[in-house]
Amino acid sequence: MNKPATIHTLNAVRVLAEYVVVHYHVSEGFQVRSLLGATMASHVMSFFFVLSGFMAMHCNMHTDFSDGCNAKWYIWTRFRKTFPTYFFFYLMGLPGSVLDWHEKGCDLRLLSLASQPMLISPWLGLYHIGQSNPVAWYICTLYWMWTAFPFIPCKTIFACHPWPKLFALYITSIGMWMMLARFYTEHTRSVPVFRTFEFFMGVAVAFTLEHKVHGCMVIVGLMGFVAFCVSDFFGPESWKAPSLSGSCMLWEKTNETWEKTNETMVAPTVVLSLFSGVWALLIHWLAATELKAEASIMVKCLSFDMFKTLSTFSLEIYLSHFVFTSFAMTISRPIGALGLWDPALMMIACYAFAYAFNVWAQPVLNTIWDWIFALTKPQGDTNTAGSPLDVR
């Protein structure tokens, strides 16, 4: 059985989406307001969940998960590709988080930090209280979906009439986020069950590639997304959700803040899956176009070698950029070198560090992981490893 070919256009879009997230965090560190801000970054995270579901199904369309060995192999390969890097940058960010705990004295901070390597932190609603690596919540949440995926009969559920089922998942997800509007999104965004709808929307997309939708639908959706982000940038008070107060509380509600400010109860910014339908259409259109080898200007632009190179250290740039930026700014401040940095230079440094880590440190981490867990490595269909894209 041959492995599915890597879909380079989706690799490229993932690279661009990661750039939005990295740019937002770096700009925030320098207190520079950018169009690529919190609103755009939050909705880009929804793209990652839809993409992960699509690649999980696309790369395993012919895998027999009724065989327990194949299911175990799939889960093991997911952890093998991501956990060493996840855990390494957890350790790198840990000293700063512990020192911060001594200053603020919140006992829940230690519980949060201890739960992260055990991958149970997404369920606790306290990730904001103590974060060793704040961006790692996405990978931690995704582990639960990867674990559940091979045990759910996706082919039986989605093979027939995938679009209506995808739409039903979208509507359910929107309704769920509206019901959760009273809670801060910092609490709810990482809970696996809340992001499951977006993941399985991506799974449904994998069954739609035979009949491609018209590209105009994708363009209209993307224009709506850009308009939404621009309107939020130029009118930040129009529907901005209240900021987290930072108190040492679990599942803190926003009731009092809403009442005091007379805000609309359900602001669009708290519906984190608002554009997941757009992402599903985009992934469908790009994958169908490339797999059918159809001519398209967008496909040609997204197939540049630059994107292929950047995609090789996609996981590393995502997990390292926040820790690297914090470390660089922390050591620069006492020696008076903080003024030498600006957002553009820090972005270049983040990507250079991630590339170097991928080339030199990642093989060492993988070797250590393989040595430690050699006895637990299951046997299974090696095709469940999929392509490099399904890491994210």
Image (tube, rainbow, N blue to C red):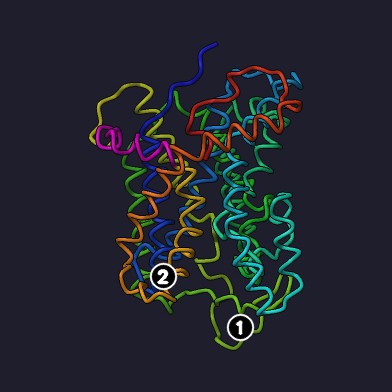
Q: Residue 332, which numbered label?
A: 2
State the image coordinates of residue 172 (x, y, percent, origin top left). 63, 51
Task: Examine the image and state in which quarter residue 64 appears.
Answer: top right
Residue drawn where x is 37% and y is 34% of the image: 286
Residue drawn where x is 35% and y is 28% of the image: 289
Q: Residue 304 in magenta?
A: yes
73 with respect to 54 (left or right): right
Q: What's the residue type where badge 2 is placed? A: Ser
Task: Examine the image and state in which quarter residue 378 appears.
Answer: top right
Q: Mark 2, residues whose alpha carbon is within 10 Å: few (<14), some, or many (≥20)? A: some
Rendered position, 207 above or below 268:
above
Residue drawn where x is 52% and y is 43% of the image: 50
* Figure quadrant of the N terminus: top right
Outermost residue on the top side: it is 1
Q: Residue 257, which numbered label?
A: 1
State the image coordinates of residue 164 (x, y, percent, origin top left). 56, 38
Closer-to-camera residue (55/181): 55
Task: Look at the image and give the residue range highlighted in magenta.
Answer: 299-313
The answer to which of marks 1 and 2 sits earlier in the sequence is 1
Across the whole image, how many numbered discs are drawn on residues? Answer: 2
> What element does badge 2 sit on?
helix
> What element does badge 1 sit on?
helix
Q: Residue 245, which numbered label?
A: none
Q: What's the residue type where badge 1 is placed? A: Thr
Q: Residue 268 in magenta?
A: no
Closer-to-camera residue (214/188): 188
Residue drawn where x is 63% and y is 73% of the image: 100
